[in-house]
Image: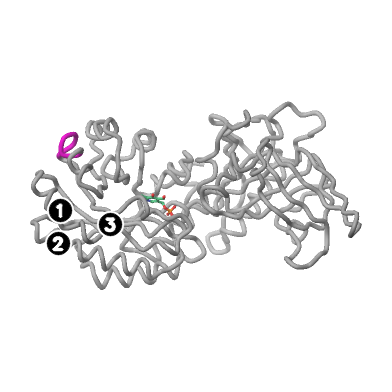
Amino acid sequence: MATAIVESYAPIYFENNHILVKKNFFFDQHQHNGPVVGRQMIGDALRHRVESIDHESCDPGDEDTFFVGDLGEVYRQHMRWKKNLPRVKPFYAVKCNPDPKVIQLLAGLGTGFDCASKAEIEQVLNMGVDPARIIYAQPCKTNSYVRYVATKGVKQMTFDNADELRKIAKLFPDAELYLRILTDDSSSLCRLSLKFGASLDATNDLLGLAKDLGLNVVGVSFHVGSGASDPLAFLKAVQDADTVFKQAYAHGFDMKTLDVGGGFCGDSFDDMAHVLRDALDEYFPPHINIIAEPGRYYVSSAFTLACNVIARRTIDNPVSGETSYMAYVNDGLYGNFSSIMFDHQHPIAKVLRTGMRTYYNTPLADGMPDGENAGIEYSIWGPTCDGIDRITESIRFDHELDVGDWLYFEDMGAYTKCSATKFNGFSDSHDVIYVCSEPGARALLGF
Ligand SMILES: Cc1ncc(COP(=O)(O)O)c(C=O)c1O
């Protein structure tokens, strides 16, 4: 669906199924309130799109699920990062959401990029980013990818075991290596230390082997787990990194950089940043560069997803006399709600449009508070034939939803689209309508 005409928007660009919306908002330097303008723009984009679709007559795919992405929100997160962690240069974790406009904006803002595969590295290089701004942060790499990065001059990469060191010695001896260490990630949503990270028992021997192989270890990296919630995990990891720096100095390595990984969430960022900032200042002198690999932090809140109600099943309870509904929407766990499976998320449905009215960002969009038996109860299901494809077990709305109505879900920018599948023949590629609520970001993007 790339044919919606949005009357009050001018002009609209279509790029590879991506829609770029330019809105003539007046940005006053003193009065500009980015989040408020952002909501207004997101609401307008959602409304214009859904009001242009008549499910009784539209073509297949016209009513497909779609995103609205506010690039101004990504920009604001960057400014917040710079304010709270001025010493730490972010290398955006592309895996989280490889959206081309997000990458373009972050490249313009001067961030680096954490890439985990050849395709991610290629995408970033093709945007004109200098190879020195990329870290190949995958401790267990594919041989052919290591040969590829050697030809492209992407030198920075992580390792955490002896076999990987021997691989790098053979394929790319000039690489700049970061020893990834184990962390306590028990408070995180997605634990990574089950799979990656050298324990402090192993780091000294690994550094000795790297020296014997003539390799160049330049730093230490860690990741406290994606969706981390305990700021003290950062403190402990910084302390451990300090220990490994000392081991590396003893082996004669010229250690230049500490990579503090990702794990930052929008909600808890200020607390995390406070603890991390103090720990870095205590353990790492100013001549040591500090980088990080934030993913979710930058994009989660920037993307809103709209889904169409494609079917409904009525459930009459003979005992209570209550009527509830199973609402089937055109996106689910095998699609952009893959975050429920892989990222332990609980996306919250809100009513976008029902009964010919649009409710974005109004109290009537929200579900009823838990425990109150007011309104009508729904369970919300994805479109595939699999019984696990359920988005919401139970939510109550003030409205009686029906086929053709729309729901929306906020905070859908991280680990959603990137891990969607085509299971059952449904698309894994959905339109993104971009809006931009920050003049600074608009200038960088050239719109
Ligand atoms: C090596 C590495 N860096 C960075 C990230 C991004 O983490 P987050 O999105 O929690 O910031 C991940 C996520 O899995 C990762 O594996």
The answer to whether mark 1 is within 8 Å of ligand 1 is no
Q: Is residue 264 left or right of residue 398?
A: left
> Residue 247 — which label?
2
User: Residue furthest toward the top?
Assistant: 59
Q: Which residues are magenta?
A: 168-173
The answer to whether mark 2 is within 8 Å of ligand 1 is no
Residue position for label 1: 207
> Residue 7 — which label?
none
Q: Quadrant of the N terminus?
A: top right
Give the x, y percent position of residue 197.
30, 54
In the displayed structure, 242 sits above or below 69; it is below
Separation of marks 1 and 2 at Cα, in angstroms: 8 Å
Would you identify the image quadrant in which residue 256 lies?
bottom left
Of the image marks 1 and 3, the number of the one nearer the N terminus: 3
Tag 2: amino acid: Gln
Residue at image position (54%, 48%) is: 413
